[in-house]
Image: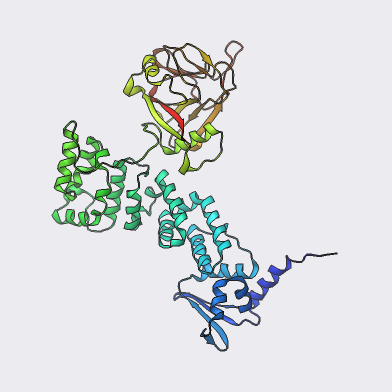
Amino acid sequence: MAYNFESELPEAFGQLLKTEMDYDVIIHIGENPNFKEFHAHSIILRCRSEYFNKIFSTENIEKKKGKYLIKNPKITPQAFDVILKYLYTGQINITNKTGAELLDFMIISDELNLKKLANVTEDFIIKNHRQFLQNDPVGILQIINYCKLLVNLQEFCLDKICSEPEILFNSDKFTQLPAPLLEILLKRDDLNLKEIEIWENLVKWGLAQSQVFDQDVDNWIKDDFNIFKRILYKFIPLIRFYEISSEDYFNKVKPYEKILSKELRNDILRYHMTSRCKPIYTIRRRKSNFESVLINHNHVVLFANWIDRKKENDNKSIPYEFNLLYRASRDGNTGKAFHAKCDNKGATIVIAKTKNSEQIVGGYTPLEWDSSNDHKSTKNSFIFTFTNRTNLQTGSVAYSNGDGNSIICYSDHPPMFGLNNLYLGKCNNWDSKPFMNKINQYSYPKLYDMPCGSFKLDDYEVFQVIRKS
């Protein structure tokens, strides 16, 4: 009969490391004041790490009192202590480590040729990226930018920050972001911020780089503008000024206009004041899957989840394009205007903001709208609501039961989801009557956060939803 006592080995080797019995290796890690001397066994280090095996194989390895002496001032004692225990026991607990500590493990693991540990740590960071980025976005970006090993992780984090820029730009540490990293972000075409918000954050960052500035730009003298210009000169060409409205430009850019070149100032003025003016400077627009005054990229990610009935989605690869077809405030708040813009366009999603609140409601259908006065059936349409559009956690969704009233295409009505679930009623009021009776059976389950009865809107939009090829 065979017996397996493998579980005893990690404990025994861990005890050997702790007691330092017959150790023959002295390892100096870090530099003062963060320095520590470790004692280990060459036979274990040779077997567990190609890095140490190569060191012990060299003829001129340094010795001290007959013991091998290895020095590495670049590694922190805190990280190496965990790594050394892993080498002896094959066990490591990274659950409670900070993002910076985990990245440090990855760097050390690569240096010591511990590929398995590096891969496990990278997977853990990606899985828990939101927590680490929110806790210390600047520190994480600094480390992954420094270490070329982390190029894939760097791209992942930059993609995440571009899709959810509030992680970085709302951080107290944003102004500590090194200039090269800020430059990388501003060069991105997928940075999900309005251009005026990018400008405002750039000004905030620039003001924090020197203590000489009066916070009121009206009090600045010529030297202040010259200093500020030197701080921001690399970033000015990265701002898409032509995407900033004339009102925002006047109120938020013009006070700092002296840091812009005369040619750029004149070209921006000409662009806003003269119709059909072609800018001298190349216009590079930031990419966006949608154009909305009601929602942002994060809502689109969630809508894609709901369409595919998924709990999670990869922000980098939203499988749909969301093309704005109709906005009531722009195109006319009538059934005729809605059908003129939205009929025969395939799958669509309707998004409406209730008046004087942050609540949004709406619905998605894979069926096309038309003016046939028909009632249509599908189990893949849904209605939704967010009690607070700034908080995705307040969202809820209900899918059609597949009856004959999933959507209703009355020629004189804007979108109708179910007989009474969500539709435009009289006097341009929207209606939702979340109760059931024997006469008007409902196509969608009750959403308890959906407004009850008639309610007014600030605006509503309709997007065509197209699966990417």
185 in relation to 43, above or below: above
In the shown orientation, is residue 211 left or right of residue 319? left
* Residue 392: image location, x then y, percent: 48, 37
x, y percent for residue 226: 17, 56
Q: Residue at x 61, y 67 (%)?
A: 86
**Is residue 190 visible in this depiction of the protein?**
yes
Looking at the image, residue 341 sits to the left or right of residue 103; the answer is: left
Q: Where on the picture, by quarter, is residue 175?
A: bottom left
- The reply, left or right, for residue 252 in relation to residue 451 is left
Q: Residue at x 57, y 15 (%)?
A: 404
x, y (%) of residue 191? 37, 44
| Residue at the right extreme, as displayed | 1
* Image point (42%, 32%), residue name: 322
Location of the N terminus by quadrant is: bottom right
- Residue lying at the far bottom in this picture: please name it: 65
**Residue 162 vertical position relative to residue 419 in the rendered view, above or below:** below
Q: x%, y% of residue 25?
A: 58, 81
Residue 164 visible: no
Q: Give the quarter of the image for residue 23.
A: bottom right
In the depicted structure, whether residue 140 falls above or below residue 27: above
Q: Nearer the viewer, residue 80 or 376?
A: 376
The residue positioned 31% from the left and 45% from the top of the image is 198
Q: Compare residues 19 and 69 and report the one nearer the observer.
A: 69
